[in-house]
Image (cartoon, rainbow, N blue to C red):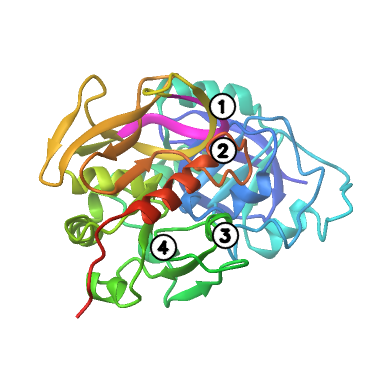
Amino acid sequence: MSAAYLVLDDGRIFVGKSWAQTGTTFGEAVFQTGMTGYQETLTDPSYHKQVVVMTAPHIGNTGVNREDLESKRIWVAGFVVRNPSSITSNWRSDATLEDELKENDIVGIQGVDTRALTRHLRDRGAMRVGIFSGQDLTREEMVIQVRKQPIMTGAYLTEDVSTSQTYVVPAQGEKKFTVAAIDLGIKAATPKALSLRGVEVHVMPFDSTFEEIMSIKPDGVFLSNGPGDPATMTEVIAVVREILGAHVPLFGICFGHQILGRALGFETYKLQFGHRGINQPVIDKKTGQVEITAHNHGFALAAPTDRTFSTVYGQGEVTHVSLNDGVVEGLALTETPAFSVQYHPEAAAGPHDADYLFDRFISLMQDNPQKLEVK
C-alpha cells in the first residue's frame, strides 16, 4: 500500500494511503455527512465530476449489493475515507466496497482525517481537488495539475448522465396516472416511489421537446435531480415554461427545483460548500413543521423568503427554508399546478420525513381541472 495525496487547489495537501483504484483523478471536493448510504451516494448521478469526502470515519462494513444501486454505474470522480472496513458483513452483500470501486476504475484514498478536511472545506468552500497515488510528482506539480481543472460554475453535465432514450417504469397495481419524468440525473428510487402510488413513469431524455413530452399525454411532469450548474440548462428551462403555460402539474426536486426557479425568473448561485447528507433540517413555512431531509446540491435559488412573489404564471411563494443557513428549499405556485423542493423526498438513503411530497404530487394531478388536448 503506497502513499497517496489529496491536493486542494488552495495548496493544502492531505497525505493518506492508496485505496481502491491506483492513479490520478480530479473533481470538485465536496463532503457528505451521512453515516449510512455510501452505495447510494456513489451511484447518484448528481455526484458526477465530484470527489466525495465521507465525514463518517468507518465506511464499507456492509459491502455493496445490486438492489441498492441508484443508477447503472458509480458516478463519483473519487472517494475519500478515513477507515475503510477490513471486513464485509451483510447477508445482502455481493462484493466488497473496494472491489466495486476497482471494477469501476474509481480512484480512492484512505487514512485521511476526513473531519479536518471537512472543516477546511466548510471554511474555504468547495474547491477543485486531485487524488494522486502511484505517481512520482512534486507537491508543486500536483497543485498545478489541480488548478488546471475546470470549476463547477458553468459546468454543463446533464448530457453525460441522462438516459439516451425513453424507458417506462410501470405502475404497481392499478394504473392511475402517467408521468413524464425528465431525466436530469434521476435516481432509481424516484420512479419506484411514484410507481408504488399507481403511476406509470416515462423516464425521458433531458433534451425531450415539449411536443415529445406531451405526446404521451402525461397527467404530470417530474423534474429530477442532477449535476452541474442550473444556469446552463436554457433549453430545459424553455420547455418547463411551456409546461407551466399548459397547466400540466409539475413537481421538481433538487436540480429540477433550481430549473423551475429559473423558469420563473429567479437567479441561482453557487453555495460556499453546498448541502450534502441525510440530516438537513428544513422548516415548512405554512405549518412550522421541521423535516429532516436528504440533500445533494451545490447551487441554490435566489427567491424571496419573506413574501410572496409574482410571475407570468400567477402568484408564488417560498414554502420551505433551510434551518441551517436560510437557503430556499421549496417553491409553489398558487394559480398554476407546480411546486418543487431542493431536497430528495425519495431519500435513498435517508429519512422519510418528505415522503408525503409524492402524495402531494398525486393530489395535484388528481385535482387538476385543466387537461391539455394534444393535437
Which numbered disc, 4 or 2, marks the residue that appears first in the sequence? 2
Q: Please tell me which residue lies in front, 89 or 122.
A: 89
Give the label on residue 183, or none: 4
Q: How many residues crowd around disc 4 within 10 Å: few (fewer than 14), some, or many (20 or more)?
A: many
Left or right: residue 257 compared with residue 47: left
Q: Whole-Å distance between the Cαs marked 4 and 2? A: 32 Å
- Residue 93 point in image, percent of width and height: 83, 56
Q: Magenta segment range?
A: 270-283
Crowding at dot 2, Cα within 10 Å, few <14 / some 14-19 / many 20+, comes out as many
Image mark for residue 117 = 1
Q: Residue at x 48, y 58 (%)?
A: 186
Q: Quadrant of residue 286?
A: top left
Q: Pinpoint residue 335: horizontal percent, then vertical percent.
A: 20, 43
For the residue pair 366 and 264, the one nearer the viewer reads as: 366
Horizontal side of 276 relative to 173 (left or right) equals: left
| Amino acid carrying mark 1 in the image | Leu
Relative depth, front residue between 180 and 162: 180
- Total marks placed: 4
Name the disc covering residue 6, or none: 2
Q: Which mark is residue 249?
A: none
Sequence order check, earlier mark of 1 and 2: 2
Q: Residues at badges 1 and 2 in contact (C-beta under 8 Å)?
A: yes
Q: Tag 2, which secondary structure?
A: strand
- Observer-side mark, 1 or 4, equals 4
* Mark 1, secondary structure of its residue: helix
